[in-house]
Amino acid sequence: MNVQGRGRGTGPGSVTGPGNRTIVLRFMDWQVYVVACARGWDLLAPAAVVEDHRIIAANGAARRSGVVTGMKARHALGICPSLNIGDVDRSAEGAAHEEVLAGLEQVTASVETLRPGLVAVSARSLTRYYGSESRAVELLVDAAARAGADCLAGVADELVTAVWAAAAGVNVPRGGSASWLAGLPLGVLVSEPVLGAPVAMVETLSGLGIRTLADFAALPRRDVVGRFGAVAAAWHRAAAGEPERTVSPVHVSGPPRVTVEPEEPVCSTETAAFLARRAAAGLHSSLADTGTACLRLAVTAVLAPPPGWTGPHTVERLWRCREPLTEEDTAQRVRWQLEGWLTRGLSRGLSRGRTRAGEIPGILSAGDDGAEEGGEGLYGVRAVTLTPVECVPAGSIAEPLWGGTDDGLRSARAAAARAQALIGTRAVLRPVLRGGHGVVGRVVTVPYGEEDPEEIRSLPTRRWEGELPAPLPGLVAETPVRLLGVDGRDIVVTGRGAVSSPPAVLRVRDRDCAVTGWAGPWPVDERWWNPQEADRCARLQVATDEPAAHLLRCRGSEWIIEASY
C-alpha cells in the first residue's frame, strides 16, 4: 500500500462566509429510519433503535406513545407493545446517507456532511441559480424525498444557527439570528453532539440559573472566558447570533493532499476501515509538518468498477467539522464514506455473484460468476485521496500541556498501522479499561484504531467501589494451587469472610512455597440475581519465599492463582 502526497490545489468554497447564507438539512430520526428501511418496517409505525438495551433514538410515533431516549428497551415495550426495536447499524447509516447525497447532487454540486443524516449547503450559488432561497430549499427537500428520506430544512446566516433552525424547519431572516436564538433553551447548545459544545459548561450554566441562550448571551464575554476558557467564547458568540469567526481560515494550497493506493482494490468493510486509518495517519502527519489543522475535508475515491459499469469512476464527498478534525475523526469519516460507496455504488453494478467472508454482497472479483476472465482483479475502491479544503493554523488549537500529539506518538501509530498491514487489522489490539472488582476481565482488547465499545463508553465510571487496590499485578494467569494452614490442612473461607487457618504453605503443582505474608480475604458476591452469571468468591494476597507475590481466588475449597506481582 502506497501513501503519497499529490499536487497542491484548492477545493470548493466554504459554506459560511461574509454575506453567505447556509441551508442545513436534518433527516429526522435518522438512525430509526435507516433500521426501518433495512428491516422493511412500516415507516409510520412506532420504532426505536437500541444500544446496550437502552433506547438511543425513537421516531415520532414512538415518542407520542411515551418512548424517550435513554429508556430501557423492556420499559419502552411495556409502554408501547407495538414498538419495533432494532440494533444500531453504522454501516447501513453510511450507505443510506450516500443514497441521499446522490439524490441531492441533482440539485447542487456541493454538499457538506456534518454527520450521516445532517448536511449543509451554501445558499449563495443556489439562490443565484434558482432565483430565490425558498425555491432552492424546496428543490433540496424534494430531492431528498425522491431518495426516500424526509427532512426538515433550516436556513440562517451562520452554520450553527442553521443546524438549530433545521430541528424546527425554520428559515431565520437575514440578520435575525440574535432575536430568533434568544428564546431557545440553553440545552440546545448540546442538542447536536457533532457541533462539539462542552457539556460540562452547559451543566454548570444550568446550575447557575442560566435557562435560555439570551441569558447566556447577556453574560460578559470576559467573565465567560475567564470561567470556562477560550472555547466558551465561540459558543457565547453563537448564542448571541454573531457572525462566525475562524482564526485565519486558509483555503489550503500548501499541505499536499494524501493519496493511499492499496495493492489491490478494496472490497470489504474490514479492509476499508484499515484504508481509512492509513489515509488519516498520512494526512495528519502532513498537516503536523506544516503546522495546520483541517476544518473541511474532501474525500475522493477512484473506483475499480466491474465490467459493464456505466457509473462514474471517481467520486468525491465533502465533510465539515466545526472544530479541527483529529486523526480519529478523520479516519471515522473516511471509513463511513468508503463503506457507503462500497455498499451503495458498486453493489448496484452487479446483481448476482458470490461473496467471500467479510465482503459487501454484490462486489465480485475476477474469476467469480458474472465477472470477465482476465479482468483487473478485485472490484472496489482502487485509491482514496484526502484533500484538506480549509485549515486553520495549528497554534489556534489549544493542545494539552502534556500528552499531546508528538513525533513519538505519530511513530507509534505508524508502526501499529504497518503491523496491521502485515498481519491483519484484528491482530493488533489495544487495551481498554472497563472496570471490575478483580483483575481478569477488567481490561478488554479492541483492534487498534477502533473506538471503545459502546457498552464501555456508556458507563458512568470505570472505577468500581470495592475494586482491587493498587498496585495491580502485572501477570494474569489461572493456575490451580493448594493453600495450606499451619496445621497442614487446606484452608477455606468461611461464611463470615475469614480464613479457617492462617496461611503457611502455597503448593504450586509439586512445589511448596512458604507464605511470608498475607492480606485479606475480600469476599465478592456479584450478579447474584442472575444464576447463569453469578460469581461468589474470595480473594487473598500472599507473599512467598521464592520471592513472589500472588493474588489468589477461592471458590468453595478450590484455590487458583489469578494474577502475580
Image (cartoon, rainbow, N blue to C red):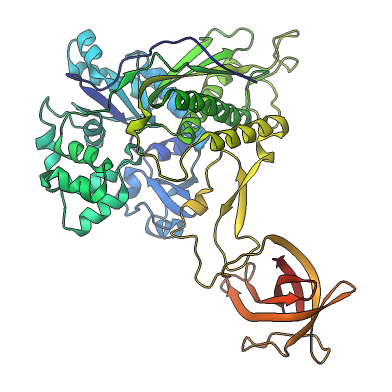
Extreme-bottom residue of the structure: 487
Give the camera-side residue of 324 and 255: 255
Residue 398: percent from left, percent from top: 35, 39
Residue 340, visible in the rendered structure: no
For the image shown, how many numbered marks are present on the structure? 0
The foreground one among 167 and 468 is 468
The percent coordinates of residue 59 (x first, y second) are 35, 43
Q: Is residue 269 above or below residue 261?
A: below
Q: What residue is at 21 percent from the left and 59 percent from the top?
A: 207
x and y percent of residue 512 in the render? 86, 77
On the rendered structure, is 364 left or right of 528? right
In the rendered view of the protein, which quadrant contains the N terminus? top right
Residue 209 visible: yes
Image: 434 above or below 219: below
Query: Which residue is depicted at the point 63% across and 81% down?
Result: 520
Q: Is residue 431 left or right of residue 482?
A: left
Q: Position of residue 24 (x, y in %)?
A: 28, 27
- Quadrant position of the C terminus in the picture: bottom right
Q: Quadrant of residue 149?
A: top left
> Which residue is located at x 49 percent, y 63 percent?
463
